Amino acid sequence: MSALIVTSKINEHRLWKTLMELAEIGASPNKEEGVTRLSLTKEELEAKQYIIQLMKDIGLEVRMDAVGNVIGKLLGTDPLASSVMVGSHTDTVFHGGRFDGSLGVLGAIEAVRTIKEANMKLKHSIEVVSFTDEEGSRFGTGYIGSKAMAGVLKEETFELKDKSGVSYREAFLHAKLDPTKYKEAIRKPEEIKAYIEMHIEQAKVLEESDLSVGIVTDIQGPVWLDVTLVGDADHAGATPMTMRKDASIAMAEVMIEVEKIAQCHGGVGTVGYVKVEPGGVNIIPGKASFTIDLRHVNKMERSKMVKEIYQSVSKSCEKRMIEWHIDVKKEVDPTSCSPDIVKSLEEACIHLNFPVKKLQCGAGHDSLIMSEITEMGMIFVRSKDGMSHNPKEWSSREDCADGTALLFQSLIKLAK
Ligand code: GLV
Ligand code: MN
Ligand code: MN
């Protein structure tokens, strides 16, 4: 590695300041409820403006693409060379934390700022990206910005509605984006040399190993199902137990099966949203709607999990004479990180005197989608108590700085 790399350091204080500033956007007045910046809402659009301003302040070429991805470019010395892309997202889940996504975007900005301040001349341009709607919390799908960029976003996505009945199309128009132009966000594989994302770990492996950072080798792929069960709403007192079509009991049975199936296959399964209707103390629920999130690092095992879930829904509903329907809202294959990027991150760790720790990733990220068009790598930063998608989500200032130092080193290697 060149002497330049050894002498330049990222600015921990500056990074932390931006993290805390961004966390104020969408922060609940009651701090215990954390940060909510659902995709394409006022709060999320404000966060994007904050990112745009930061990028402009450090002299990047900034643009918003056709699906609202914010992209800040540091020009390389060879205008014909492909770009190294780096980033994450600034949308959050409902009542989320301050680091999920934000650290990846702000760390990338800090790393590029350090490169610029050191006046390093790199052959490849670096594009910092903040993707639109990674979480999928508002419309039940997610990875919208990266899917559009990779050319795999489906037109029917724009028909999806949020819980208040607003469609994706309407949300786009509200954000001054034209939904008919989404294909303009597509990037060709030859334009992007690599995509690298720093993210909080959201689990306890690094904490238990007493390490600030780790290198991701594989990422689990999520399948999201929307399940609807329809029986009969009826009188809770007058209807004998043997004569009911209670949709909530069928749902409860399936929920227990989700846990068993996930454990049996070594994957994970979650029912994160449930609703029973009409919803009265003395009414048998005639309708139950719920979501299932299933993940595994192995696609075959995950397919078996999905198949067994269908069988379980069918079995529970058949014996209760309940109708059922399942909508697949998301299906993304598990993937492995580029062995070359993993190796280069290992070298960067050694250079920084960080122990090399490789680990798997349980959460989903835009990197899963970007791996369809380019070489992909991920850096993890220790999460306190492994907690995430929760207002208590926390990574220390020092750990965020270590992750960003590693990101900085790997960007220089990739872009030189
Ligand atoms: C996003 O954070 C996901 O893994 O669901
Ligand atoms: Mn995230
Ligand atoms: Mn998340």
Image (cartoon, rainbow, N blue to C red):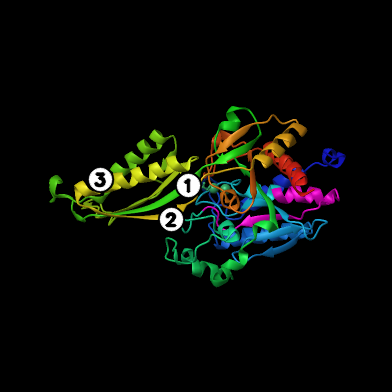
State left or right for residue 334 relative to residue 210.
left
Say which mark, if any, is on residue 222. Answer: 1
Mark 1 or 2, nearer chain start: 1
**Mark 3: which amino acid?**
Lys
* Extent of the magenta region: 108-135
Q: Quadrant of residue 130?
A: bottom right
Callout 2: 10 Å neighbours few (<14), some, many (20+)?
some
Callout 3: 10 Å neighbours few (<14), some, many (20+)?
some
Q: Is residue 355 above or below residue 307?
A: above
> Residue at image x 54%, y 62%?
41
Q: Is residue 119 magenta?
A: yes
Respond yes or no on whether mark 3 lies under 8 Å from ligand 1: no
Please name whichever residue, 154 or 74, is drawn nearer the observer in this view of the structure.
154
State left or right for residue 365 relative to residue 301.
right
State left or right for residue 357 relative to residue 291.
right
**Mark 1: which amino acid?**
Pro
Q: According to the image, label 3 marks what residue?
A: 315
Q: Secondary structure at mark 1?
A: strand
Q: Is residue 239 magenta?
A: no
**Mark 2: which amino acid?**
Lys
Is mark 2 in CB contact (under 8 Å) with mark 3? no
> What is the tally of numbered marks visible in this picture?
3
